[in-house]
Image: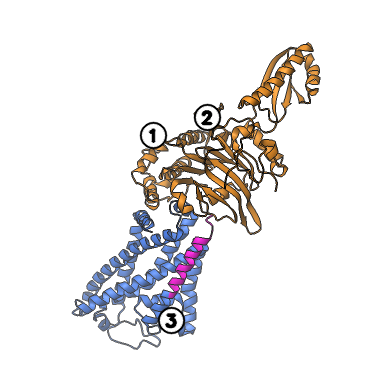
Amino acid sequence: MTPTAVTPAGVTPAGVRNTVGVSQRRIPAATDGSAVEVLHLTKRYGRRTVVDGLQMRIPTGAIAGFVGPNGAGKTTTLRMLLGLVRPSAGEGSVLGEPLTRPQRYLSRVGALIESPALYPGLSGEHNLAVLAALGGHDRARIPEVIAEVGLAGRGGDAFRTYSLGMKQRLAIAAALLADPDLLVLDEPTNGLDPTGIQQMRELLRGLAQRPGGRQPRTVLVSSHLLAEVEQICDWIVVVERGRLAYHGPIEGLMAAGSCSVLLRPQHPDHLGALAELTTGRNLSVRRDGDRLRVDLPSGAPGDLGVGSNADSVTDTMLAELNRDAFAAGITLVEITPVRVSLEERYRSLVDQGLVDQGLVDHVSGTSPATGVSGTSEGSR
Amino acid sequence: MNRALRAELLKLRRRGTLVAIAAVAAMGVLASVLAFALADDAARPLDGPGQGFAMTLARLAGPDGPSIGFAAGMTFVGLLVFVVFTANITSEYGQGTLRTLLLQQPRRVAWLAGKLAAMFMVMAVALLVALVLSVATAVVMAQLRGVDTSQWWTAAAASAAAASFLNALLATMFFALTATALGVLTRSTVLALSIGIAWMLPVEHIIQQAWEGATRTFPGLVFDAVARGGLPDASYGPALALATGYAGVAAALAAASLTRRDVTA
């Protein structure tokens, strides 16, 4: 499987995200090696298709969010990647090894699938000792990973006495025993309170880094908390009804579709005239209090400031609007880009039934047949 | 397999394992006490109503006297082992620990083999403890009942004790493999125990009342025959062969099911 190196419009592959949370991480380029790659991955239970021809790629070193509504097939996909569930069809690779040979790559993979599942009667350390023996890992790693997840001093307590957050942490410690190249975490913030979520977010950011200048871990985090994904991840895979909706840099998803700016004239009386000016440029406009909300066309993600080309297109459009307004005697006292959240963008995609619309053209122009990088999968 | 063996042995280093060993030992002691306490003073016909316990003090004075109680108790130990192994394997599904374990050891059959090997080792220790305590109890009980123990400290007695231990170990392994297969196939403690216990206790014994061939045919009764070193209705050799066949089928079913089925727990 050779990935098609296509980068979504408006994204600088080797650039640095300017959103909160991942400012120190390089956005993986579409041409980076793949930690995970699947083609036409399918899982059927009887007549029910849970994962339907999924195609996705996760570059090495990415912190990838794996999002989708409940029942979208996220956990089943992760289970297939980890050799727990056998695919009905399709192929793939994890860390360069075929999906059909999990014993070749699982020693370099750490994972937490669904709820933390360890022996309740054993202490945290005892549980990790069992798993270290089973995985052939150095038991000297146990205190290290316990400290890494912030459970130092509690390792001797029985697992059943842990809070849910502590159980999640211990399960992540178990996943770290192998010092894995790929970390797969399924809903690690499930059931946590806001403080626990905040702590988990910090933990996940730290887990991606490895000391000694080694290559960062690839982290694949399944979640339905899009705000979390937006803050932590630099790559995103969106699935809907078992099919790929989008995968690529988060900026690529944000850049897809329209975005908006708010324009406020000095005098509210000028709102009507300003609206005429903007509609004259075939822009969608609606009133928002004493301001106008103008939807910019696709591929103009000026609100996010993620790509210099896209910025210049938006800047030019806004400059022209401003000039026309000034010429018409309208003074703009506010031009505010509206930042579209990942959640809004995601909902927009899902609500539009993006899979069936062949959003591939909308996002990146990549062929759905090969849509392995920075694209959404078109209809089949 | 070695990694799975070490991991399971590590897991078994806990109080619950000691309790299980103590339970097996207690069964051995209890069986020994009962054998001596209920033994008749003189031989009586085995058949017919009101003939009492088919054990005599003269029989207990023989070379196999000290281990007779141990062998008799293995029927109950077999059922205990069945319950323990069933609960152990199904709890891996119920608690979801199976997925955690298989992420560390994706070779499923190797994992299962290592796990069973570790549990068999602990089981062997438990049986050895039970045998020692059972023999010790027999010595005390022999004095109380006035049983002559001159034949107990001979090579023949040691050989009989060793045979009892080996038979008990084999029988409990057969019970354990059957329990494991049922556990892997049903993935449910309640279901596996219901099927296993219902079959091996009431069903097999009801049929046995009507058909003497049941003793040398049905798995629970055949395993019991092996544990006792053979019975009048089921001689040792054929019973051992059939029991080995049952265990082999159980092991194959468990391995096939574990390998081929998805882990969704």
State the separation of the CA atoms marked 2 and 1. Answer: 22 Å
Instruction: Determine the image quadrant of residue B120.
Output: bottom left
The circle on residue A21 is 2
Circle 1 residue:
A212
- Residue B126 in the image: state x and y as whole percent: 32, 64
**What segment carries the magenta color?**
B245-265
Chain drawn in blue: B
Q: Under tag 1, what secondary structure? A: loop
The 10 Å Cα crowd at callout 2, few under 14, some 14 to 19, many 20 or more, is: some
Q: Nearer the viewer, residue A252 or B142?
A: A252
Chain to which the residue tagged by mark 3 belongs: B
Colour of chain A, in one word, is orange
Q: Residue at x 40, y 84 (%)?
A: B233
Dot 3 amino acid type: Arg
Dot 2 amino acid type: Gly
If you read the primary sequence from the N terminus, does the residue marked by circle 2 or circle 1 appear first? 2
Q: Under tag 2, what secondary structure? A: loop
